[in-house]
Image (tube, grey):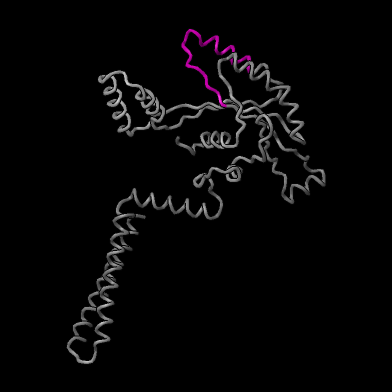
Amino acid sequence: MHTWIMFLAIGLWMYFFRQIANSITLALDYSRIPGYEELLTSAYMDIIMYASMLVLVLFIWLKYFRNDELVEFQKDRFIFFICDLTGKHVINSFSEQMKTLMKLIPIVAIHENGVLEFDSGQHGIISKLKIFLKLEQKKYNEFGVLFETFPPRISDEYRDLHELRREKIVNGLPVNTLFESISCSVEEPKKQILEYLLSLQKTSGGKARDQHLADMYLSVSEDEDPIISWRYFAFLSLGEHKTAEQAGIQFGAVVPGLLLNMKNAELRPIILQDERDVINAYQVMLGEMNL
């Protein structure tokens, strides 16, 4: 592709050079004949126009297509652009709104206590027809709970005990209950370190200490290499229900015991109840957010 684009650029350059040469010839001819001032001006304008187009093609070539890597990048960029226009690519244009999140995760609502409601997807004419003819069973919306956990770093001597506590979490769930643990690596700038150093600088501890903290802050802030942090989530399905109230009953029957077992395993679980927190969590899990 790079070769064909290069041939196209060379062809355009040759065409513009030829047009410039023709215009210069006409300008020289018209300059010798009295009364051809208007045609002479037109020839000069053609020279300027074709020269500008030649420079523009040269600029586009050098900026976007001068090597194979740039050509591949522009090709991918074009494909993503077309997919975005046709609605087939939503991750690349992820916005921080619930309606955009629903393009990937069919969340209908966030109810009391952080109970998430997911659309069953049986809205098409074909699905309704199959349900009417009893070829397909009607499905109700599914409900679930999203947790964020903060597990500690476990040494080898306590690993067996930790595994037993994790087994107790699963064993305490009802039969045929979906429970997933999700680990996500996220690239983060060193915000927390910088904020901590700033908090230490609020109180003076002597000239030497203050200078040391200032040097540390400067060193960290100038280091642009990202660091990898880990975030941990868990999802519990509450099953399909007609109403959020029925899902709330299932929540009361399962979640308190699950939270207790997770706390005993030192996972420090938090139920995500705020819309922003839920969107943030799914952005991290989908690989769309660098904090």
Front-most of 98 and 160? 98
Q: Is residue 54 magenta?
A: no
Task: Assess whether residue 165 is covered by the magenta stretch.
Answer: yes
Can you give x and y, in whole percent of width and height, for residue 189 in the image?
39, 32
Q: Is residue 21 left or right of residue 197?
A: left
- Residue 266, picture quadrant: top right
Residue 121: % across, % down: 69, 43
Report the magenta residues as a range. Answer: 148-169
* Overall secondary structure of the magenta section: helix
Q: Position of residue 234 (x, y in %)?
A: 59, 26
| Vertical comparison of 251 with 67: above or below | above
Q: Residue furthest right?
A: 133
Q: Kindly identify the residue that appears in the image at 58 percent across and 34 percent down.
A: 278
Q: Is residue 170 above or below residue 76?
A: above
For image coordinates 29% across by 28% down, the residue present is 219
Quarter of the image for residue 122 reads top right
- Between 28 and 188, the one nearer to me in the picture: 188
Residue beneath the point at 55% across and 33% down: 281
Total number of numbered discs in the rendering: 0
Q: Quadrant of the N terminus?
A: bottom left
Residue that extends furthest to the bottom in the rendered view of this protein: 35
